Amino acid sequence: MSWTPGASLASPLAAPTPSGWVDAAVAGWREILVDHAHCEKKAASSALALIFAYPEDEAGALVLSRLAREELRHFEQVTRLMRRLHIRHERRQPSRYATGLRSAVARAEPDRRLDLLLTGALIEARSCERFALLAPRLAAPMGEFYAGLQAAEARHFEVYVQLARSTCQPDAPDRWRERLAALAAVEADLITATDPQLRFHSGPPA
Ligand SMILES: [Fe+2]
Ligand SMILES: [Fe+2]
């Protein structure tokens, strides 16, 4: 697997976050923080799941292992912030966003692996966009923390896109672009449709 660190890629997001979500997230920042802790754990666990699913790709496993460790560090940082703000962790059911993206992933290889990597890329890109939107609207320490997380999520987006590109078959080197566009359309629908729940990756409230 070839890997080009630091390659700059354009954002793949097919729609911007609606302002209604930003307003709801600023008002419901405690709820967002609890869900954010859940997302960091899930990000680490999704990277680990890819290592288990494709063990023959040693180079890819090492890249994902580093990413998983970074997500767990984020989880530890969120937990410290929550403790400081007297907010407790809570069990979460899978969100509409996660379920919707998962249902768009191809069941058969080689597209399945590509889709799993590209949904990872889209989630990271959306997280990056939302940290950037929330950071200036939230008081310290949460605003400062979110400003600091943007760069990591942008980097994770690039990691996933590079991994997806490198898994494309020689006879279809641009397959990742087609799948990224298709998955980005699904992702955009999920974050623009109204949502009964406020989550880090939810749509705007009704
Ligand atoms: Fe993270
Ligand atoms: Fe991330």
Image (cartoon, rainbow, N blue to C red):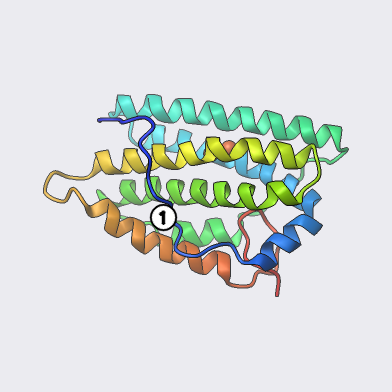
Disc tally is 1
Q: Is residue 146 left or right of residue 129?
A: right
Is 68 above or below relative to 26? above
Q: Is residue 88 left or right of residue 135?
A: right
Q: Residue at x 25, y 48 (%)?
A: 110
**Image position, residue 104 (x, y; %):** 41, 61
Q: Is residue 29 left or right of residue 9?
A: right
In what element is the residue under mark 1? Answer: loop
The picture quadrant where one finds residue 140 is: top right
Identify the residue at the far front of this view.
136
Q: Residue at x 47, y 58 (%)?
A: 101
Q: Residue at x 25, y 40 (%)?
A: 167
**Image position, residue 67 (x, y; %):** 48, 30
Residue at image mark 1: 12
- Return the residue nearer the eye: 33 or 46: 33
The picture quadrant where one finds residue 143 is: top right
Q: Quadrant of the C terminus?
A: bottom right
Q: Residue at x 35, y 56 (%)?
A: 180
Label 1: few (<14), some (14–19) or many (≥20) C-alpha neighbours in 10 Å: some
**Image position, residue 71 (x, y; %):** 57, 33
Q: Quadrant of the N terminus?
A: top left
Q: Is residue 41 visible?
A: no
Identify the residue at the far left of this view.
171
Q: Is residue 130 visible?
A: yes
Q: Amino acid at mark 1?
A: Pro
**Image position, residue 128 (x, y; %):** 56, 46
Identify the residue at the far bottom of this view.
206
Q: Is residue 71 left or right of residue 35?
A: left
